[in-house]
Amino acid sequence: MLLGMVTAGAALQAGLAAPSFAQEFETTTPIRHVVVIFQENASFDHYFATYPSAPNPPGESPFTPFAATPTVNGLSGNQPTSSVLNPGDVGALFANNGNAIAPFRIDRSNAVTCSQSHNYTNEQLAADAGLLDHFSLAAGAGGTSQIGVGCHTASGAGVPGFAMGYFDGNTVTAMWTYAQNFAISDNHFDSNFGPSTPGAINLISGQTHGAQPGPANTATLSPGSLLPDGAGGFTLINDVDSALDDCGSATTNVAFTDPNFKHTNVGDLLNAQGITWGWFGGGFTPTVPATATARAVCGASTPGHLAAPVPPGTTAAIVNAPVPDYVAHHTPFQYYASTSNPHHLPPSSIAAVGFSDQANHQYDLSVFFTALAAGNLPAVSYLKAQAFQDGHPGNSDPLSEQNFIVDTINTLEASPFWQDTAVIIAWDDSDGWYDHVNGPIVSASASSADAFTGSTCGTPAANAFPGRCGYGPRLPLLVISPWARQNYVDHNMTDQSSILLFIEQNWNLGFIDGPTAPPKGQASFDRIAGQINGMFDFDTRPHPEPVILNPTTGLLVP
């Protein structure tokens, strides 16, 4: 039910300021604005293995925990007192770990790393039936990159075991500081095994089945990106661009267009209730607009690793090479015809942001900050950083990521919307970084791509969609809000679709699949998702004042 809802057209004609728009919608909690900052590629242990204890070596951001800080389900044992640059030189650190190489600390001076192997099958192989002892077999997989510890040896080969590395509060300082002041979960999981695109799709729909090769697709996608279900349908299991996006691949792409399947995401649910929302992505504005005969081009780029020190053995010219701002396979609403903006058209006006117009709720990241400054914050906003700040190893790093997150939250805290806003910081996948906690298999699959135990991943129900095995790796999750509990660790089990569930429940949207549940193994994950509500205190408002951080150090600003 909506209270005094104002339509987009009426609001624009009246010239109304947008703060009243989202606040007119009835919610089940005091939260009237949700901002999801969706970052890239970090397991929980990779960022919080030793929280809240950091060694504080000279020259790094010092971290001192609050008194009575609760511990997390992290790695046990002694931690090093200084950087360990050689993955094999870890002594007795975490001696009971089952991997051939024990977990080791990555120093702040080596914040630039390469990406690890983290596709649907390889993540299951690393988990090894829940033993979690094959991570040290993964090699750094940085493509052609030659930057950072763990990327490549001098011969160009990957460095085995680098997936066991972790950062602590001297590098991911802002994340630890937010955890001190707000709420963090240590029992949050990737909905499925696999990389970015399945994680992004699960964030907005909890359902990766129903994708089809695009009409111009000339590549054989199965089982690399699409897994057949045996009945003519496919499940998306790895990264591939959308067929509904000019700035994605023109020949290797998919879309959720299976005519036998209901394709619904949270944007459709919000639209049905007239509730404002938007996805705001870095680099979404095309550098070359679409024409009647040519696709739009998103060619903007930014030098990489601007906030990180130059790693030993490399040069600033290599580290600061241009990184394309826009990543098509990180933009989930573009995979659905109902919510895509294929030609990357801009909104008709800043006052129209959040409403249905030619932009169809898909915007450049800069539009979020322009609209916010103009007093227009949609009820639900998803933010995707430019690639150099999204945290993805190789093109980004924790310090560049920190700059983006802190600047964004500081800006929101200074806005008139802050008192009823919740910022949810989540990640799309683990990047293959080690984590010592294995989630339950709540959705099983037995297919050519599964390898959790032999050639299966649990025992699927009859007619269950294949390629949806999960939960996958454990990921970080933080809630920053005036209503978030303070210095709190939530142990309730959740997954990426728990964020979807919170939005559904807060605005009474219903489930993705509607009121009737599909057969077991075919429903959106929102029906089985745990709640993040325990990370809030809706009775006392724990944070009457903003918590402002320094984007460079990650520490509190006095």
Image (cartoon, helix red, strand yellow):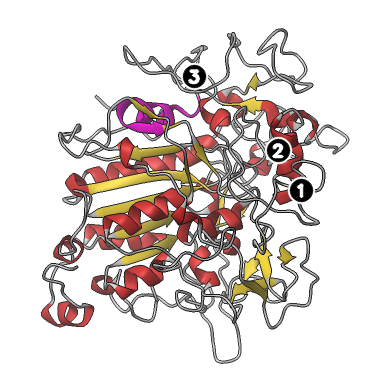
- Name the amino acid, label 1: Thr
Where is residue 379? Give x, y as percent.
27, 60
Which tag is nearer the camera, tag 1 or tag 2? 1
Point out the image quarter for the C terminus: top left
Instruction: Compare marks 3 and 1 and give the one earlier in the sequence.
Output: 3
Q: Mark 2 points at which residue?
A: 147
Label 1 secondary element: loop
- Name the amino acid, label 3: Glu
- Where are the magenta residues, as a range? 171-184
**Relative depth, front residue between 145 and 436:** 436
Measured in 3D between alpha carbons, the distance from the residue under mark 3 to the one under mark 1, in whole angstroms, is 45 Å
**Does residue 179 belong to the magenta stretch?**
yes
Q: Name the residue under label 3.
A: 60
**Does residue 57 belong to the magenta stretch?**
no
Label 2 secondary element: loop
How many C-alpha atoms fall within 10 Å of the one at disc 1: few (<14), some, or many (≥20)? some
